[in-house]
Image (tube, coloured by chain):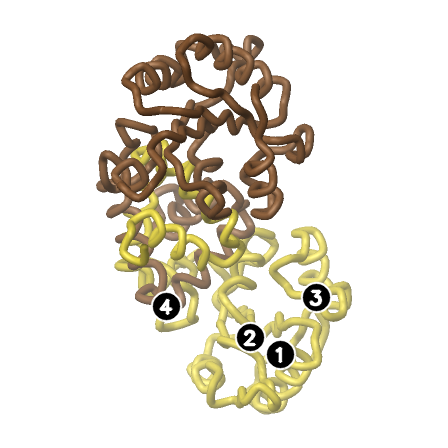
Chain colours: A brown, B yellow
Amino acid sequence: MAEDPVEHLIALLARIPGLGRRSARRAALRMLADPSRLMLPLAAALEAAAAAVRPCSVCGNLDAADPCRICADTRRERGLLCVVEGVADLWALERGGAYRGLYHVLGGVLSPLGGVGPEQLAVEGLLARVAAGGVEEVILALPATVEGATTAHYLSDRLAGSGVNVTRLAQGVPIGGALDVLDDGTLAAALRARRPA
Amino acid sequence: MAEDPVEHLIALLARIPGLGRRSARRAALRMLADPSRLMLPLAAALEAAAAAVRPCSVCGNLDAADPCRICADTRRERGLLCVVEGVADLWALERGGAYRGLYHVLGGVLSPLGGVGPEQLAVEGLLARVAAGGVEEVILALPATVEGATTAHYLSDRLAGSGVNVTRLAQGVPIGGALDVLDDGTLAAALRARRPA
C-alpha cells in the first residue's frame, strides 16, 4: 500500500500545514475527479516555485528575483529599514500597504531557552546594511512577546551609536499576538504611531 | 503579480478543499523554506497520481489499476455487491475493515431538484453486473438522507425480480449524516445489522 499513488498522494497532502489526514483524503478525491483542473497546475506551480524562489541575499525575503522586488524597487524609501521576525510578517506588512520602506528578515527572535542566539539570526547583515550608510531609521517590527521584546532591546543596544533612529511599532499590537494574524488596520495604526525604542 | 511564482502557488494551494487563503500562505511559506522536503515530492506525487489513477471500469473506484485492486482481489466475496454514493464512502467502508465483498460506485444519488436522474448515475452498469450472474446480495450503503432513501427505493424496484437479495445498512447511521465521517465502529455495526430493503 505504501507504493500506491493514491495513498502516497494523501500522505504528502496530509503533511501540508493546515491539512489533516481526513482533509487530505477529501482533497485527493476532489482533485482525482478532474486531474487537469487542479492537480497538474498545482504540480507545475510547486516545481516552478521550488526552482525559482530563493531568499533575497539583501533582506531575506522569499522571491523569484535576487535582490527581491522590494529591494530592487527604486520607488521605495531606502532610508527606512523595517526589521521583521520572518517572511510571513513581511508579507503581512505588505498586505497592509502602509509601509513603503525596505525590510530586513531576522529569521527568528532571540530565545535563550530555545537555543536561538544572535549568531542564529541575520543580525550581522543588519548591522552591515546600517554601516553601509543611507539608512535613517530602523523600525523594529517584532512580535509583542517576551522573546520579541528581548530581541528589540538587543538590537537597540547593537544599533546605539550607529547614528540611525531606532523605533518600534506602537502599542496596539495585542500582547502575545503574532504579527501575521493581525488585521491590516491595526497593523497600519501601530506603524504610524511607532516611537523611539 | 499574477505571474509571480509565489502568488501563483498560493492561489492554487488556496483552491485545495479545506485550505483557505491564509492557510495557503502559511503552507507556501513553510514549504518554500525547504523545497526538497515537501514541495518537490508533492509535485511528483500529484503528477504520478494524475497520470496513473483512473476510475475502475467495473466498479467506479479510483485506482492505478483497472480493474481496481478490490475488483481484482480473488479473496473477496464476489457474491456481495455494496452500492455506495461515491469513492469517499467506499474508502470509509474499507477503512472500517468489516466488509469483504465488492463495490459499485453510483457517482451520486437521485436528486430531482438537483437535476440528477438515473441516467446520470451508474445504474445500468449495476443492473448489468447483477444480470451477468454470481451476485447473491446487493447491499445499498447509501446516505441516510431523503435523496439516499429515494435512491435506495428506486434501486430496490429496479432489482426486484433479478433474484438477488437486496439489503440496506441497518438503522444506526445518523439521520442526515454522511457515511465517510462516521466512526468505523458505527459503520461496522450498521453493516452487520443490515436488513431487507
Residue annotated with mark 1: B165
Q: Judge the density around disc 3: few (<14), some (14-19), many (≥20) Cα neighbours within 10 Å.
A: few
Amino acid type for the residue under numbered disc 2: Glu
The chain identifier of the residue carrying mark 4 reads A
Indicate whether A89 appears above or below A83.
below
Amino acid type for the residue under numbered disc 4: Asp
**Secondary structure type for disc 2:** loop
Whether labels 1 and 4 share one chain: no
* Residue drawn at 57 percent across, 90 percent down: B158
Residue annotated with mark 3: B177
Using the numbered discs, state the Cα–Cα distance from disc 4 to disc 2 in whole angstroms. Answer: 34 Å
* Residue drawn at 23 percent across, 40 percent down: A65
Amino acid type for the residue under numbered disc 3: Gly
Would you say the residues marked 1 and 2 are in contact, meaning their CB atoms lie under 8 Å apart?
A: yes
Mark 1, mark 4: which one is toward the viewer?
4
Using the numbered discs, state the Cα–Cα distance from disc 3 to disc 2 in whole angstroms. Answer: 28 Å
Q: Judge the density around disc 2: few (<14), some (14-19), many (≥20) Cα neighbours within 10 Å.
A: some
Residue annotated with mark 2: B136
